[in-house]
Amino acid sequence: MKFFLDTADLSEIEEVASWGALAGVTTNPSLYARIGGKLEDFENHLVKICKLVDGPVSGEVTAEDRDGMIEQGRTLAALADNMVVKIPVCVEGLAATRVLAEEGIDVNMTLVFTVPQALLAARAGARYISPFVGRFDDIAEDGLGQLDDIVTAIQNYDFGHPVEIIAASVRSANHVTQAALMGADIATVPYGAMKQCIYHPLTEQGLEKFKADWEKVKNA
Ligand code: G3P
């Protein structure tokens, strides 16, 4: 499973990219708002992210009709070679995905919560499909169970083009573990949960012990 960072924060991206395991970034309008992003800086900001990461960067359309999504999608895709157009799953989004996919533009279909939504996204030509785990849990549904079903359903078929599942709305290291065991291709993880993925108390204790024992060696 590959690790994407779910953020629009340049310093978070720069830091996690320096760890050496980052394969991509996903953004959405809420993440851009969270960093105080301005409308006029949006495209330039995505270009900056694309330069920081060696892998796909998702930028989301905000138009609500297919023609608007297609136009925004073309504009976003032209910003950088590694730009992916994120589109919400709905009738207009599926129609826009078909057009953009036929033009060779990679689409990440977002806000996916069900197997039929995921299958329709893949059939419309989406390169990436993003089931939201945490938000499904938030409404007392089984986010990980739904992710598992979507992974299985997508793996059952050949869509004639590559399709990768991005476990999204990830909230914890356990979500990452379970997504990997299910065979999700990618987990897009917020900065806090990404740090949680590295940490374990026994690792910390082990490091302290190595350090203390090395002092003994030095002073022997
Ligand atoms: O990028 C979309 C998704 O990961 C959002 O997650 O935490 O806002 O539900 P969250």
Image (spheres, grey):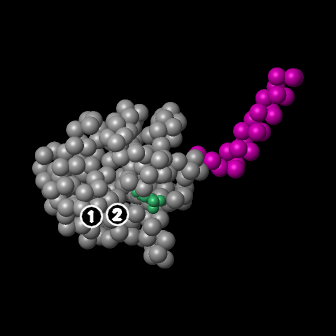
Instruction: Give the quadrant of ligand 1.
Output: bottom left
Q: Position of residue 71 (x, y in %)?
A: 18, 49
Tell me if mark 1 has few (under 14), some (14-19) or many (20+) residues whose alpha carbon lies within 10 angstroms of its own.
many
Q: CA distance from mark 1 to mark 2?
A: 6 Å
x 42%, y 55%: residue: 30
Q: Label 2 near label 1: C-beta < 8 Å? A: yes
**Residue bounds of the magenta highlight:** 198-220
Quadrant holding the C terminus: top right
Dominant secondary structure, magenta: helix
157 sits left or right of 216 in the view: left
**Residue 150 forms part of the magenta stretch:** no
Q: Position of residue 72 (x, y in %)?
A: 22, 49
User: What kind of element bears circle 1?
Assistant: loop
**Which residue is tagged 1?**
89
Whether residue 164 is visible: no
Viewer-side residue, 85 vs 137? 85
Question: What amino acid type is highlighted by mark number 1?
Answer: Val
Choose the circle earlier in sequence order: 1 or 2. 1
x 25%, y 51%: residue: 107
**Which residue is tagged 2?**
111
64 sits left or right of 21 in the view: left
